[in-house]
Image (spheres, rainbow, N blue to C red):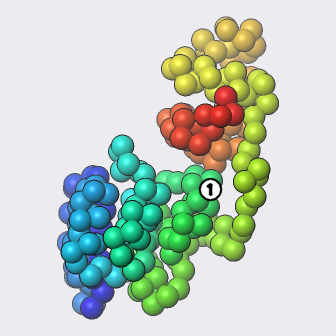
């Protein structure tokens, strides 16, 4: 029997997924909504695998493993998330997570991924397959040119594309093109993700 712990801050999702996974004959699953709760559980209960969301509101998945290891956690961690940037995925892999599963994938794929990870293997969604075995250098983090930095600063201030264009005296379409280049460099897909990743990982580049 595989003892699993699902950590996700969306109650409806974790309750629904827990019920679905409980139908698997070899899975026993608990769930909670915060890293603090998860640490208490892994300290008191033998957990074979933690299914960990990347974005837990005020908390991030990268905060879990260092603290869990200090408490004697010896199980595996599979990130189960809607989205994570390549930069953060690399960080999690270096920390020791055994895989990354995207929530858009089928449930039966998750069950297979759990068994693979518990069996000592790795499970990476095909979007992240190219990261396995990589050893990125610290200076490999993308840098921004001056125009990108200016646009990003205005985005962090909450300005619209039209307002940014007026401040920089460029066209709105040019602002959009710069934003797309920022998305590509940081591995994000939306303006909200760009803001979060910029504050978390690139503050010293602004």
Between 109 and 141, the one lying in front of the other is: 141
Please give the name of the residue rendered at 23% of the width and 69% of the height, measured from the top-left corner: 41
Viewer can see residue 195: yes
Q: Which residue is mark 1?
A: 86
Left-right relation of 132 to 108: right
Left-right relation of 110 to 86: left
Please say if 78 is above or below 139. below
Specify the quadrant that holds the N terminus: bottom left
Please give the name of the residue rendered at 41% of the width and 71% of the height, measured from the top-left corner: 69
Please say if 56 is above or below 143. below
Specify the quadrant that holds the C terminus: top right
Please give the name of the residue rendered at 67% of the width and 9% of the height, measured from the top-left corner: 167
Q: Quadrant of residue 151?
A: top right
Mark 1, other Cα within 10 Å: few <14 / some 14–19 / many ≥20: some
Q: Quadrant of residue 47?
A: bottom left
Please give the name of the residue rendered at 65% of the width and 44% of the height, measured from the top-left corner: 186
Q: Position of residue 179 (x, y in %)?
A: 67, 31
Q: Position of residue 194 (x, y in %)?
A: 57, 37
Please say if 170 is above or below 204. above
Between 89 and 205, the one lying in front of the other is: 205
Please say if 40 is above or below 170. below
Q: Position of residue 174 (x, y in %)?
A: 74, 23
Viewer can see residue 99: no
């Amino acid at each position: 029997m595989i003892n699993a712990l699902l950590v996700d801050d969306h109650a409806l999702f974790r309750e629904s997924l827990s019920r679905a996974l409980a139908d698997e004959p070899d899975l026993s699953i608990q769930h909670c909504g915060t890293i603090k709760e998860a640490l208490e559980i892994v300290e008191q209960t033998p957990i074979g695998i933690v299914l960990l969301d990347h974005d837990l509101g005020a908390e991030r998945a990268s905060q879990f493993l260092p603290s869990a290891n200090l408490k004697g956690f010896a199980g595996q961690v599979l990130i189960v998330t809607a989205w994570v940037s390549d930069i953060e995925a690399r960080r999690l892999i270096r920390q020791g997570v055994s895989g990354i599963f995207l929530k858009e994938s089928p449930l039966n794929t998750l069950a297979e991924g759990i068994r693979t990870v518990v069996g000592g293997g790795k499970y990476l969604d095909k979007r992240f397959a190219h990261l396995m075995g990589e050893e990125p250098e610290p200076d490999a983090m993308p840098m921004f040119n001056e125009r990108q930095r200016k646009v990003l600063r205005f985005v962090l201030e909450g300005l619209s594309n039209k307002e940014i264009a007026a401040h920089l005296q460029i066209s709105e379409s040019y602002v959009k093109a710069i934003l797309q280049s920022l998305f590509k460099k940081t591995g994000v897909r939306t303006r909200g993700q760009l803001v979060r990743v910029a504050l978390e990982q690139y503050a010293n580049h602004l």
